[in-house]
Every structure is written in structure tokens, then in C-alpha cells.
Image (cartoon, grey):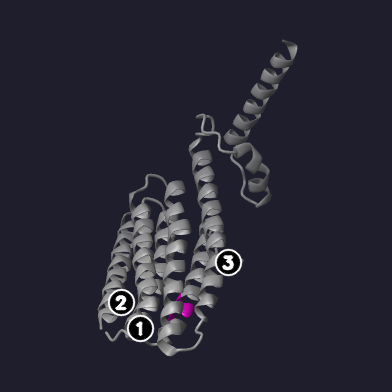
Amino acid sequence: MSVATLPWWAAVPVAVLLVIGGLITLVGTLGLLRLKTFYQRIHGPAIAISLGAGCILVASMVYFTAAQSRLVVHELLIGAFLLMTAPVVAMLLMRAALYRDLRARRAAGLDDNGGDCGERESTPGLSDEGIPLGQPAAGQLHAEADEQRADAAGGGGR
Amino acid sequence: MTTTTLLSAAVYFALGCVVLGMVLCALRLAVGPTAQDRVLALDTLWMCTMLLALLLGIAHGSLVYFEAALLIALLGFVSTIALAKFLMRGEVIE
């Protein structure tokens, strides 16, 4: 290991950014390990790791700029790439997880246990994608819709 | 001289943090109850590997590690997208 000798006005920010970035990365992965459900766990990498990576990227930029006495900013490439791809990855993983959870619950016939996380809104999208809906689930959905209609009628009559 | 010791201490500290984070990711990758947990842990592991390459670049004072970090970021994104698509549809290329 041969760290270059920097003036103090560059060494102190680089050291502080490195320590903060390492700690934030550690906190993000700790959240990935410790949180309860998948929908909580995805926030650790998606938010914390992005911030930690940003800190370490800025530290690298400042370090090489000061060590080589010229402007070295090509870490901005990685930064822009991460800023573009981290939300895409998080959104795709979240959609895949939601889709798999819905499919598992529908297969288990547990549609009516009160956990109402937007199933009726996403049902046409699911059937559009060529996955055959189970008949019992569809029947339950109709039953729920009928109940809602009855409730609405009752509320309107009052 | 004192700035060099400060910098090397900070680099070693950040390296230790990132390696510990990679160990935690590997634990989640081994434990993870569902498939999406494992894919998420793998994505985080890719990102930690990229940070590790950047930190090694600072520690060795070399700009070559930057290209490795860029390649790791690109490959991690593509592989995670492919795995998410596989989780969603059951196949990658239709």
C-alpha cells in the first residue's frame, strides 16, 4: 500500500469522506441483513449504498485530483451510471417480488385475508401478461367486488 | 507524513467496512428465504465489489482500478436486470 502524500487541505476531506462512505455502506448492508421483510430490506441497498458509493466516488475524485495535480473527474461516469441504474434495479426487483408474492398468495387461495396491497388494481395487468388466473381466485375477486358494491349501495341509501 | 498516515488509516477503515459489508451480503445470500432476497443480496455484493475496487485504487494510487470498477458496475447492472426479469417471467430471452 502506497498512499500518496497530499497537502492537509486535500487529505482531511478525503479521509472524512472515506470514513463516512465506509460507514454508510456498512449500515446499508447491515440493514439488508437485519430487516424483517423483503420490502423493508430493499431500502438498505437502494438508498444507503448509493450514498456510500457517492461519498467514496467524491473521495476518489478529490484524492486523484490532488495527487496528480490535474483535474481527474472520470469517477463522474460511475456516479452518473449508479444514479441512473440504482432506481431501475430497485423498481424491477420490487415489481418482481410483488408479482411473485401475489402469484404465491393466489395459488394458496389466500386472497381474502385482508392484506389489501393493490391486488384489484394490478389484476388486469397480470392477466394481460398471459398468466392464467386461477378460477377460485377470480371467483373470490368477483365476490369481493359484489361485497363492495353492496356496501356502496348501503352507504348511498343511508 | 502525518497526512499519509491519516489517509492510509482512513483507506484501511473504509476497506474493512466494505469487506464486512460484503460478508453481511454473503450471509443474506446464503440465508435469504426467497429468491428475490438472494438477487438483492447479489446486487449489493456487486456494488460492494465496485467500491472495493475504487478503494484499492486509492490505496495503491493507481487509476487502472477505475476501469475495473466501471466494468464491475456495468456487469452488475446487466446481471441484476437479467435475474429480475427471470424472477418475473421465468425466462430471460423470449
| Secondary structure under the numbered disc 1 in the rendered image | loop
Is there CB contact under 8 Å for labels 1 and 2? Answer: yes
Disc 2 marks which amino acid?
Leu
- Quadrant where the C terminus of chain B is found in the figure: bottom right
Which residue is drawn at the image coordinates 34% and 72% (left, top)?
A15
Residue drawn at x 72%, y 10% as measured from the top left: A158
Q: Which of marks 3 and 1 is nearer the N terminus?
A: 1
Q: Which amino acid does label 1 sit on?
A: Leu
User: Which SS class for mark 2?
Assistant: helix
Task: Kindly identify which residue carries mark 2.
Answer: B7
Q: Tell me the number on the disc at residue A48.
A: none
Residue A84, disc = 3
CA gap between label 2 and label 3 equals: 30 Å
In the image, which is nearer the foreground, mark 3 or mark 1?
1
Q: Give the range drawn in magenta.
A: B68-72
Looking at the picture, tell me which residue is in the foreground, A87 or A17: A17
Residue B74 appears at what percent x and percent y? 51, 75
